[in-house]
Amino acid sequence: MNTDTLVRVEGLSKKFCRDLKRSMWYGIQDVGSEVMGLRRKPDLRTGEFWAVNDVNFELRRGECLGLIGHNGAGKSTLLKMLNGLIKPDRGRITMQGRVGALIELGTGFNPILTGRENIYNNGAVLGFTQKEINKKIDAIVDFAEIGDFLDTPVQNYSSGMKVRLGFAVAAQMEPDVLLIDEVLAVGDMGFVLKCYNLIDQILYNSALILVSHNIPQIARTATQIMLLDRGVGIVHTSDVPAGISAYYQRYEIKNGNFQGTGDVDLLDLRLVHDGETHRNGSNLTIEYGDGMEIEIDVLCREKISEPSMYLAFYDQSQRGVAEIMNFRECIQVQDLLGKASFSLKLPSLPFTQGKYSISISFSDTSHGVLFRNQSVISFNVHGKSHGWTSVQFSPEWQMKQMEHLDE
Amino acid sequence: MDSKENLTVYSSEGPRRFITSHLWDIAQSLPQAHELGFRLFKRNLKAQYRQSMLGLVWAVLPPLATAALWIFLQGNNVVSMRDTGVPYPIFVLTGTMLWQVFSESISAPINQVTDNRAMLAKINIPREGLLLSGAYELLFNTFIKLVILSAVYLYFHQQVALRSLAIVPVGLFAISAAGFSIGLFLTPLGLLYQDVNRGLAILLPFFMYLTPVVYPVPQDGPLSQAMKFNPLSTLIVQTRNGFISQPVYDLSLFLLILLAFTLFFLICLAVYRIAMPIIIERMGS
């Protein structure tokens, strides 16, 4: 495989202005000085800030940079500069070969016109000639799988179908450098997997820059991670799990969403790991497979005759990952009143790398739910590998036998 | 990065560039711009007529309406006009059609760019393609106007002299170039400030009545002086004279105005290319 450098970004910076009126006025000034051939000063003017600040990286063929960061961290601005939509205020981008972008799908579609007509419209926007589309139209139609809808006006399409058609056209690009910005969010599972497979194929022969909040997707594709925070690439590493772990650590899960009747309060919930006690906000990171102890203090103002307590683990995107069996099934407790402390011991957590939060609910058989508290505390799991799903078993693998086949 | 071939560089620094070097870039991207522009033109045309019952009639309805109003006013002696040399309906219809060409050329660039904002903000397209799409639409609409105009001329048995007709294509080009370059000049500004579009909507009809469109050039008085400084007055009057077989005078002034607008157009084209990245980062999508 060819391993030449396809993208080189050096000291790249871009400034924006938060105030609309002022930004428009600066725009007029900038156009003026550019037309006169004057050099624009790279310093910040009143009200401006660096949306992208001194970003550097290099990508070779077959490599993929995963750009992650919070909303407004500068990911899309960086991508827009790479795509040549806006000009850097400082620094330099050098790219080799054809640059393609999957930033918006189906641009140029006219809702009145049929899918077939719009393939040509979208194709022209992406830089294909009519001849090229004529040659590729069968492949596009095959890939989109929209069947009889091809000759229906696009306004009658579902949003997923529009994305299918748009992606099918864009998939015909044969870029050396491909920029992708969260375009695969819509579309059914089968189509999304098809898109990933295609991206894998493209990646084999090109350099990819991928912006996404979908961390499993990043983990699957990226060979480098850059974590952007307020325009600065605060982490840049080819150790993908480490980069992702840094991203999770910057997410503070707020103790949110407390519901209760007031009869019972959650006083405290602590995690004990390696002999150390952690409360909410203490940023506990454990290794894959580590165990922990959970300690819970409650205050019962009323007598609770048949208490039951239930805990569950949630991942970053608030998907339930695992739950802890109701303590009523394990120990006998009756007529609870006043302060009470409980603890439970988990010998090993087989969670994949990521950030997890714990939710707790407390109820009584006769009174129903007394309190429910989402994301009481969170912790990070650090691991050597990053899986697609949240639970990763590490079993004892054995190879039973091997036989050489005689040809 | 060994080979220099196929290299894309975006940098804040760079050699000082002059307008000619921008124009050279534009000339080189013309084939791609045409590919996109022609496709968008076809798309808009198809969509427009598929969604309309009157279809092509819309291209000539505004000048027809203005002309009808003035034919009515003149026929009922509400306004009195100096002899125009040809039947008044011929005179006024030719005038309003030419004016329509001008006003459509002014709004063509800004309309095209505004309609395709989302595309501009998300995809790196040859941005001159949008202008070409507007130009093709203009050409098409002008063609329909000429067809209607010929029908009217036939109806009134109006003769056209081939010799004076020769100025018509040049005149149409000059009128569109004037409108298009003014529109192009306003486009970057109009993307940032809505005032431009609103102001145009008010100023254009106003200017129409300051230009001898529905009336012949007055022989004396302050208005006749003012018209000497209105380049559009010369363009429209001379082009109409070509249509109605009247002598074309001031040909050198006519050509001078044409040349001036052509130069202005080239400058605006370069400004458009320079300004768009700066505008795009400010207009969102």
Image (tube, coloured by chain):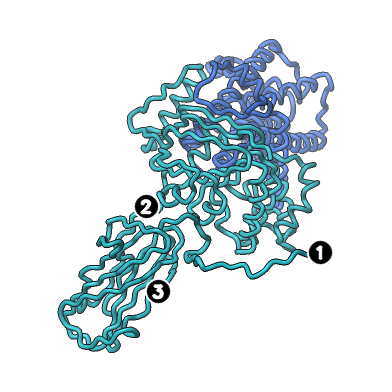
Chain colours: A cyan, B blue
* Residue type pointed to by label 1: Asp
Residue A400 in the figure: left or right of residue A25: right
Q: Which residue is mark 1?
A: A406
Question: Of the numbered discs in the image, which one, if any, rests on residue A323?
Answer: 3
Give x and y (percent) for residue B156. Answer: 80, 34
Provide the chain ID for the residue under circle 2.
A
Instruction: Answer few, some or many: residues within 10 Å of disc 1's Cα (few below 14, many 20 plus, some between 14 and 19).
Output: few
Query: Which residue is at the front of the view, B227 or A8?
Result: A8
Can see residue B67? no
Residue that appears at 37% across and 52% down: A249
Whether residue B217 is situated above or below residue A135 in the rendered picture? above
Q: Are marks 2 and 3 on the same chain?
A: yes
- Dividing the picture into quarters, in which one does residue B63 lie? top right
* Sequence-first tag of 2 and 1: 2
Q: Which residue is mark 2?
A: A249
Chain hosting mark 1: A
Residue at the (37%, 70%) spot, across then down: A347
Quick check: B202 above or below B268? Answer: below
Quick check: do tags 3 and 1 share a chain? yes
Under tag 1, what secondary structure? loop
Residue plotted at (65% across, 19% down): B262
Q: Amino acid at mark 2?
A: Gln
Which sits earlier in the primary sequence, circle 3 or circle 1? 3
The answer to whether tags 2 and 1 share a subunit is yes
Quadrant of the rendered image containing residue B22: top right
The location of residue A23, given as percent across then percent down, is 40, 33
- Residue A133 position in % (x across, y down): 76, 45
- Outermost residue to the top: B252
In-front residue for pair B5/B143: B5
Q: Chain of mark 3?
A: A
